[in-house]
Image (cartoon, rainbow, N blue to C red):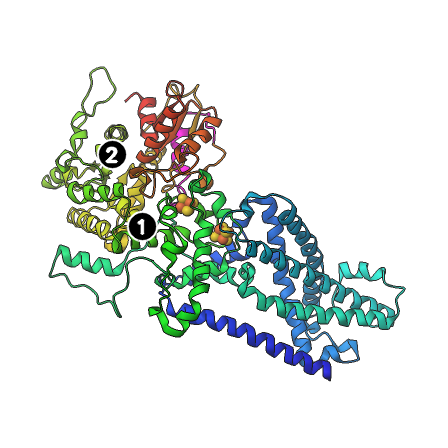
């Protein structure tokens, strides 16, 4: 009776404290903005089953991944047994002198046997793995477990949480072993199947029945107390992911990684600037700050991301900025948010969003230098096992710096001014945008000039071309990128593809402005382009630039620009399939080609196959870099890096990526992006390898192969 009362009081205290911790979290969640619409339930459930329950992303590191997945799956199974223990305790059956009564859900029969047997096996498995994790953490120097963002307290927290799990498993096995040994000694029926504890019980057969019963009871109390302690410790520990990882994955973004959200308040202002008579939807409540300066400017997803972070460091281990010695660590971005929120919670709960303590997330926690080192490559978001979205947080802080403080790096300001004035990130005249088209020749002796059709001419002839070839700013003005443009135009003409360009009606897509945080300029550019494209009733857009490809495909959609957007690698691959581009495999037969995946094509939009199909059509010897496809290392140009000085580090990102390419011993580095072309060409120059190794776009490779 006394035991029963003590148990009920303990349970009330544990559930009460846990509810209090969760109520604080819910109050903060209610205070924060909604990140996006949480619809598409089916897609979310399937993502949760795959990523959270199936642990698919954790298997990207196979050995440690399997170890972690076993612990996670074991926890899920053991939780059922723990639930039964709490029920037993509440009903009081466990305190009954007759042990036959103390298994309340044993009526489930074989299902019960299966759950109990799995729990028993998992208890031993987890115990062994946790010892391995502790040895790894305490005695092996794993780079991922270091970093200036990890304080002494974090290391102690990790060790404490692992020790608690270890004790949980020891007490669970102790309880099961005592139960089985006692039942054997007394000749009672055993409820459930205990493969591990049965063996352990064999070693205790000399002990008296009452000793065995005491062993069971002691471990029962120890286990249940540890469950209550652990559950209440978790919300304040890095191991909160035990609770948070499943909801965090469920609520994560289902859109392509490189899609950046629009800002409704900016859309209204831009629409009114372009047309003072425009009717814009009303935005409820007080006007909010642009971007994120402090935690309350974030969304509740940013908050639960920060609570769910396991501090595993997978994100930082793949970050190109971090790997080249820059200060940026995506794990720190997430931890900064959590720490700042912890500091601010009491004030926010008392005074609401207006509370100020004179500090803020940016710049007191996350610094300018960190934010501007990001290439927006999304390697961090790709790698995070629980779908945390670091680049969005970084870009929200850049938005604050740009729109509220006008304090972006000076070269980024110049880039923005150029886009505003000339419709390109450089100081070139908008009137020269189509100059490249005046001298495009097939590579034949007669020097046959090719005509690049203009959309305005086509429409005047009452023709509506199938494709709009979007050239982009780099493809129109950058000397090296113009070669890509010309070669792709040759392919389009050679295959008699029905296309046209906008010529001087084209202007910058706004992609770089958006990554810099200048949402006003992005939307101005986007809305102007959409007006032109819609006026021509454009349905399909093809482009050689993965950044513009991403912007048109994913970001123009929110502003009313709905098109089928195709990257040139996809169209070339399609033309090869249709038999319109037939290689004789002569020029590249003796060559080795390696392919660099552009982040905005691969990781961003999941296109890895098309460029490889193109290369396989001309060459049999494709040598992959060690980091390829979704693990590909950024070239270092994205996120506006190409337009500014790099932050201080040990080397340039493009240098590191060039080293990856050189390791393959390829003669040719192929890519499918004008920005990657610039960076890798610079890398090859830096390594003084221009004579031996050439950098080509896939369009150039096809033209060389065909001799056109
Ligand atoms: S997006 Fe790329 S550069 Fe930016 S933090 Fe993530 S991994 Fe690092
Ligand atoms: S953000 Fe994700 S990958 Fe990075 S430390 Fe946290 S859990 Fe690990």
Residue 183, given in percent of the width and then of the height, sits at 82, 70
Q: Which image quarter is the C terminus in?
A: top left
Report the Cα–Cα distance between label 2 and label 1.
Answer: 21 Å
- Residue 579 is at least partly visible in this image: no
Tell me, yes or no, whether the two marked residues, 2 and 1, touch with CB atoms within 8 Å. Answer: no
Q: Nearer the viewer, residue 9 or 250?
A: 9
Is 697 located above or below residue 396 in the figure? above
Residue 693, given in percent of the width and then of the height, sits at 40, 22
Residue 235, given in percent of the width and then of the height, sits at 53, 65
Please name which of the two marks, 2 or 1, marks the residue nearer to the observer: 2
Is 607 located above or below residue 90 in the figure? above
Magenta region: 602-624
Disc tally is 2
As drawn, the residue found furthest toward the bottom would be 1
Q: Quadrant of residue 212?
A: bottom right
Residue 572, given in percent of the width and then of the height, sits at 33, 34
Label annotation for residue 475: 2
Residue 618 lies in the magenta stretch = yes
As drawn, the residue found furthest toward the top would be 445
Q: Nearer the viewer, residue 214 or 232?
A: 232
Is 396 located above or below residue 708 in the figure? below
Prevailing SS of the magenta stretch:
loop
Q: Which residue is mark 1?
A: 554
Q: Is residue 368 left or right of residue 317?
A: left
Q: Nearer the viewer, residue 315 or 608?
A: 315
Residue 450 lies in the magenta stretch = no
């Amino acid at each position: 009776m006394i035991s029963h009362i003590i148990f009920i009081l303990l349970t009330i205290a544990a559930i009460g404290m846990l509810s209090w911790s969760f109520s604080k979290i819910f109050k903060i969640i209610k205070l924060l903005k909604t990140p996006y619409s949480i619809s598409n339930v089916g897609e979310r459930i399937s993502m949760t089953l795959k990523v959270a329950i199936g642990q698919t992303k954790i298997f990207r590191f196979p050995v440690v991944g399997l170890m972690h997945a076993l612990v996670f799956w074991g926890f899920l199974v053991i939780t059922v047994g723990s639930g039964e223990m709490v029920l037993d305790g509440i009903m009081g059956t466990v305190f009954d002198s007759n042990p036959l009564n103390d298994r309340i859900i044993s009526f489930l029969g074989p299902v019960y046997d299966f759950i109990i047997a799995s729990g028993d096996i998992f208890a031993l498995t987890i115990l062994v793995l946790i010892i391995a994790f502790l040895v790894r953490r305490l005695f092996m120097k794993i780079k991922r477990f270091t970093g200036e963002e990890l304080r002494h307290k974090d290391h102690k927290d990790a060790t404490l949480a692992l020790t608690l799990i270890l004790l949980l498993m020891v007490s669970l096995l102790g309880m099961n072993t005592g139960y089985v040994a006692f039942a054997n000694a007394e000749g009672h029926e055993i409820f459930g199947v205990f493969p591990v504890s049965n063996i352990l019980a064999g070693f205790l057969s000399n002990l008296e029945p009452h000793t065995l019963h005491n062993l069971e009871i002691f471990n029962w109390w120890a286990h249940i107390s540890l469950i209550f302690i652990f559950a209440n410790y978790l919300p304040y520990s890095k191991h909160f992911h035990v609770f948070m990882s499943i909801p965090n994955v469920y609520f994560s973004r289902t859109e392509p990684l490189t899609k950046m959200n629009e800002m409704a308040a900016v859309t209204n202002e831009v629409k009114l600037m372009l047309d003072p008579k425009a009717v814009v939807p009303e935005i409820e409540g007080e006007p909010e700050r642009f971007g994120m300066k402090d935690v309350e400017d974030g969304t509740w997803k940013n908050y639960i991301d920060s609570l769910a972070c396991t501090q595993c460091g997978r994100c930082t281990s793949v970050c190109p900025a971090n790997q080249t010695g820059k200060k940026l660590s995506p794990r720190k971005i997430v931890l900064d948010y959590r720490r700042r929120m912890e500091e601010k919670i009491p004030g926010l709960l008392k005074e609401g969003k207006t509370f100020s303590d004179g500090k803020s997330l940016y710049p007191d926690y996350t610094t300018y230098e960190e934010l501007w080192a990001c290439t927006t490559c999304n390697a961090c978001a790709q790698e995070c096992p629980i779908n945390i979205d670091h680049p969005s947080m970084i870009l929200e802080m850049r938005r604050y710096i740009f729109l509220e403080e006008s304090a972006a790096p000076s070269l980024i300001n110049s880039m923005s001014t150029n886009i505003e004035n000339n419709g390109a990130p450089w100081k070139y005249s908008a009137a020269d945008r189509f100059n490249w088209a005046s001298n495009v020749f097939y590579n034949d002796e007669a020097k046959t000039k090719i005509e690049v059709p203009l959309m305005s001419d086509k429409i005047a002839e009452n023709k509506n071309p199938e494709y709009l070839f979007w050239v982009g700013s780099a493809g129109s003005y950058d000397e090296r990128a113009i070669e890509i443009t010309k070669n792709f135009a040759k392919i389009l003409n050679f295959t008699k593809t029905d296309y046209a360009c906008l010529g001087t009606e084209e202007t910058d897509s706004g992609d770089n402005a958006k990554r810099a945080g200048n949402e006003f300029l992005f939307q101005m550019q986007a809305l102007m382009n959409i007006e032109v494209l819609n006026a021509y009733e454009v349905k399909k857009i093809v482009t050689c630039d993965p950044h513009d490809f991403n912007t048109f495909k994913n970001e123009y959609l929110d502003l009313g620009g709905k098109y089928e957007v195709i990257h040139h690698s996809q169209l070339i691959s399609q033309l090869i399939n249709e038999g319109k581009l037939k290689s004789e495999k002569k020029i590249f037969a003796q060559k080795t080609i390696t392919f660099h995946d552009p982040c905005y094509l691969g990781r961003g939009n999941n296109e890895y196959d098309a460029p490889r199909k193109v290369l396989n059509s001309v060459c049999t010897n494709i040598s992959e870099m060690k980091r390829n496809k979704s693990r590909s290392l950024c070239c270092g140009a994205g996120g506006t890096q190409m337009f500014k000085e790099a932050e201080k580090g040990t080397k340039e990102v493009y240098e590191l990526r060039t080293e990856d390419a050189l390791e393959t011993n390829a003669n040719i580095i192929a890519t499918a992006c004008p920005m990657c072309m610039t960076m890798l060409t610079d890398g090859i120059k830096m390594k003084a390898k221009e004579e031996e190794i050439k950098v080509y776009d896939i369009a150039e490779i096809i033209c060389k192969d065909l001799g056109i």
